[in-house]
Amino acid sequence: MTYLASRSIAVHGFDQRGWGRSVAKRAERGLTGPTSRVLADMAAFIRAHLPSSPSDPPLFVMGHSMGGGQVLRFACDNDGSYTDIVKQVRGWLCEAPFIGLAPEEQPNWLTVFGARLVGKLFPRMHYVHEIAPESLSRIDEEVRSIREDGLMHNTGTLEGLGHLIDRTADLSSGRTRPDGAKVRSLWIGHGTDDKGTAYSETKRWFDSYAGVIEDREMKTYEGAYHQLHADLCREEFEKDVADWILARCEGGERQVQAGSEVKAPEPKPVESKL
């Protein structure tokens, strides 16, 4: 966010229901609600920042990980509930979107079945899924920061888990796919060594279903982990995001190649210092 601001891009963010400072007590952790609630919360936030006149700057929407999957679900607008918003968004960006879990994070079918069964009776029951900070970044201080951040937690609810799995399955199967008449531009970035979400699933979705979007791009970051914004490739990632946004703003338009896929060179190891 600091880098984008340095490029004159205003950034607005919110704590998703059940996360960050939206949680007043431990029992509220992970209470995102069903998909309808998740999308309604997103709609309320996005609508508040839509341009109100042609002279206002264009709006871009970006999500990371679970948020990236939610951004895709919202932009695809399966039932037409948010068509008015989707058509006003200039571009959608997804960082390591959750379209499929990395193999090491994949739960077995018995766990999923049991969670769904119990979730029908106790939807607010907590479900903890720990992802090792070392699996998110290759930078030592970033790993320490994640581990020590009191606002980050790995607690969801059985209701939220069930709806998350359903949203992901809809994306992976193609039941959730974009409408080229609504989505103007799409950018996706994903690291090949992501240990949280599956790079292969993201690339398959992009190749299979994003073709209807004329202005689309998927950037591959060789060797990168899940948090591109906090990994060895972060400077390149930040510049890629800013350049892509500014190229689609008045005065910064450039010719863009439709359906492009770009591979970034593997970064050289660096020594981390406090």
Image: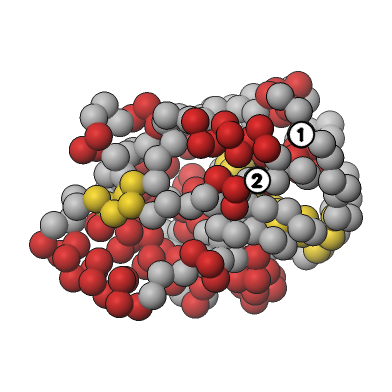
Report the disc number at residue 135: none
Q: Nearer the viewer, mark 1 or mark 2?
A: 1
Res 176 seen here: no
Find residue 207 and report its image quarter: bottom right
Q: Which residue is drawn at 29% across and 54% down?
A: 127
Total labels drawn: 2
Q: In this view, does 45 lie above or below 267?
A: above
**Left of 24 or right of it: where is 39?**
right
Q: Is residue 42 above or below residue 177?
A: above
User: At which x and y percent is residue 183?
Assistant: 60, 56
Mark 2, residue position: 137
Q: What element carries label 1?
A: loop
User: At which x and y percent is residue 218?
Assistant: 74, 59
Callout 2 amino acid: Ser
Callout 1 amino acid: Ser
| Mark 1 neighbour density, 10 Å: few (under 14) some (14–19) many (20 or more) | few
